[in-house]
Image (tube, rainbow, N blue to C red):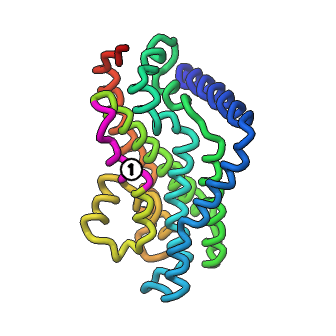
């Protein structure tokens, strides 16, 4: 426990230092606006489609926005707090900077996670949380304390899951830094799946994004439990355990990669 608290303090100091350095960049307000524009316009095609053709069965635009926003908010939190792992293959392994981390008396995991931070990434989770609140209000959903816990569990599980994706990529980069573009299927492309009603997804995709990468578990099932869409309520509580399971698998890959690392050389 003492070690965990010590690492948390180190992470907090590194994160604060990187945040302050980001503010020193004079163009950061423009980057804020750029990310805000991308986040707001990303689901615009879905909104326009529903406004033109109406609901798809029981799936209204408010339902789609709720599910989509839960997934993207989780991804945004992982970008904010684990950005170092997102760029790890190129900023650490390829350049040889990981060798310097090995010389420091601190956890490699903490150093890698806090090695990079972009202030403008905070826009994504904040905007998506606002979209979640809007969708719930439009559907006239009154949240109980249990519903709030389910939503918080969904965000926490999604955050852990997407952090695990970044860590998985970092673990694989110890063997190769090329050919890792496919990992974007598990990040940016994965939350796009929630823009399609679950019932209309192909069975293969539905199973893949439920049991392999639990995107639907951290978005559709918690939303269904809170709004009463017919799925068993207990499915909405699986977000955090599913995210933790994927994170644990990714951590194993990371540790195996670190153990086999033999320096980049120069």
In the image, residue 11 lies at what x, y percent? Answer: 59, 27
Q: Residue at x 33, y 72 (%)?
A: 201
Position of the C terminus by quadrant = top left
In the image, residue 203 lies at what x, y percent? Answer: 26, 69
The image shows residue 242, relative to residue 119, as above or below, that is below
- Residue 170 drawn in magenta: no
Q: Quadrant of residue 90?
A: top left
Q: Residue at x 56, y 76 (%)?
A: 62
Side of 64 where 216 appears, left or right: left
Side of 182 where 162 appears, left or right: right
The image shows residue 55, relative to residue 228, as above or below, that is below
Q: How many marks?
A: 1
- Residue farthest to the left, as pictured: 204
In the image, residue 38 lies at what x, y percent? Answer: 58, 60
Side of 77 where 205 appears, left or right: left
Q: Quadrant of residue 263?
A: top left
In the image, residue 98 lies at what x, y percent? Answer: 44, 21
**Which residue is tagged 1?**
184
Q: Residue at x 59, y 60 (%)?
A: 39
* Span shown in magenta: 176-188
The image shows residue 14, relative to residue 41, as above or below, that is above
Circle 1: element type: helix
Q: Is residue 70 visible?
A: yes
Nearest to the observer: residue 185 or residue 247: 185
The image shows residue 26, relative to residue 21, as above or below, that is below
Crowd rating for badge 1 (residues with CA inside 10 Å; few <14, some 14–19, many 20+):
few
Nearest to the observer: residue 210 or residue 167: 167
- Residue 179 drawn in magenta: yes
Q: Residue at x 32, y 20 (%)?
A: 261
Nearest to the observer: residue 30 or residue 5: 30
Nearest to the observer: residue 100 or residue 254: 100
């Amino acid at each position: 426990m003492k070690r965990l608290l010590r690492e948390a303090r180190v992470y907090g100091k590194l994160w604060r230092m990187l945040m302050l350095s980001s503010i020193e960049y004079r163009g950061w307000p423009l980057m804020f606006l750029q990310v805000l524009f991308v986040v707001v316009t990303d689901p615009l095609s879905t909104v326009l489609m529903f406004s033109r053709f109406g609901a798809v069965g029981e799936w209204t635009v408010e339902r789609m926005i709720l599910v989509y926003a839960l997934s993207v908010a989780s991804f945004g939190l992982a970008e904010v707090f684990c950005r170092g792992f997102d760029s790890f293959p190129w900023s650490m392994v390829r350049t040889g900077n990981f060798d310097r981390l090995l010389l420091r008396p601190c956890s490699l995991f903490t150093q890698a996670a806090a090695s990079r931070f972009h202030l403008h990434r905070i826009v994504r989770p904040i905007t998506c949380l606002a979209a979640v609140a809007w969708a719930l209000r439009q559907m006239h959903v009154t949240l109980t304390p249990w519903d709030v816990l389910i939503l918080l569990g969904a965000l926490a599980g999604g955050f852990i899951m997407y952090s695990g994706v970044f860590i998985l990529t970092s673990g694989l980069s110890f063997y190769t830094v090329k050919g890792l573009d496919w990992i974007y299927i598990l990040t940016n492309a994965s939350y796009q799946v929630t823009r399609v009603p679950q019932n209309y997804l192909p069975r293969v995709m539905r199973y893949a994004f439920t049991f392999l990468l639990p995107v639907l578990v951290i978005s559709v099932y918690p939303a269904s439990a809170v709004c009463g869409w017919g799925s068993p309520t207990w499915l909405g509580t699986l977000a955090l355990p599913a995210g933790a399971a994927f994170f644990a698998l990714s951590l194993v890959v990371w540790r195996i990669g670190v153990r086999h690392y033999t320096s980049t050389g120069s």
